Amino acid sequence: DAGITQSPRHKVTETGTPVTLRCHQTENHRYMYWYRQDPGHGLRLIHYSYGVKDTDKGEVSDGYSVSRSKTEDFLLTLESATSSQTSVYFCAISPGDPALDTQYFGPGTRLTVL
Amino acid sequence: AQKVTQAQTEISVVEKEDVTLDCVYETRDTTYYLFWYKQPPSGELVFLIRRNSFDEQNEISGRYSWNFQKSTSSFNFTITASQVVDSAVYFCALGSSNTGKLIFGQGTTLQVKP
């Protein structure tokens, strides 16, 4: 199994509060991703990183920001959480091209925004 | 546009039955990859298979087999002699060299009853 951990695994927060989710990998893979999973939508890409300090937006990036200061860590921040951001968040990693290489997923973080 | 359609939202079978999960994709790219992932009730996403657009050979792995047909833009997944442990949500995904992203279908929930 790919060495990917996510923290926290569960979080309940209130609308308007900032939230940061952390993804940590031990595989030294170049690419890291944040997805959200919602019923009826499958997985949707929020942001991804192709190297330290190199990030780009996915299809549902509004309301989210990311940072990657080290190869092994990729942070997802909700600056001011809203109820629509209640979801399960998955981090993924791949050694190369996001579309061509296999992406391996972390265990997920269940976030509830009240 | 890139799109993945898993028309079967839920499938229920009795143990030992064979079951096929359908996946139809849309892309104008000549180079692309197709993936299947399994999400058991525990929630993690498990990689099952990756297939490139130039390899139309069917693949068999134990009770699992995949049928890739470019003529119908389909990449179907068959489980032979299903078992209760096969109960999960299964996602098909398309990786396109043009978009540089992985696009997921909405998933098919498979329930295998004893």
Image (spheres, coloured by chain):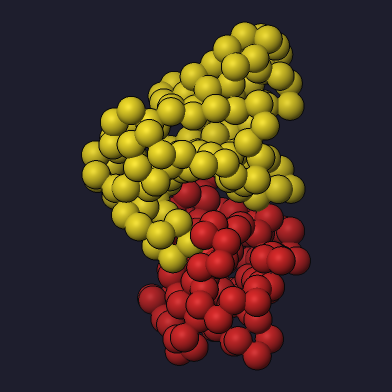
Quadrant, the N terminus of chain B: bottom right
Name the image quarter holding residue B25.
Answer: bottom right
Q: Position of residue B51 (x, y in %)?
A: 45, 75
Residue for point 74% across, 58% down: B9
Name the image quarter holding residue B28.
Answer: bottom right
Q: Position of residue B96 (x, y in %)?
A: 54, 67
Tell me: residue A99, above or below residue B20: above
Res. A12 visible in picture: no
Chain that is coloured red in the picture: B
Res. A20 visible in picture: yes
Residue for point 29% across, 35% down: A72
Q: Residue furthest front?
A: A54
Q: Position of residue B104 (x, y in %)?
A: 61, 57
Depth check: B44 or A86 in front? Answer: A86
Residue for point 33% across, 28% down: A69
Chain that is coloured yellow in the picture: A
Residue for point 65% across, 45% down: A59
Depth check: B112 or A49 in front? Answer: A49
Depth check: B83 or A14 in front? Answer: A14
Quadrant, the C terminus of chain B: bottom right
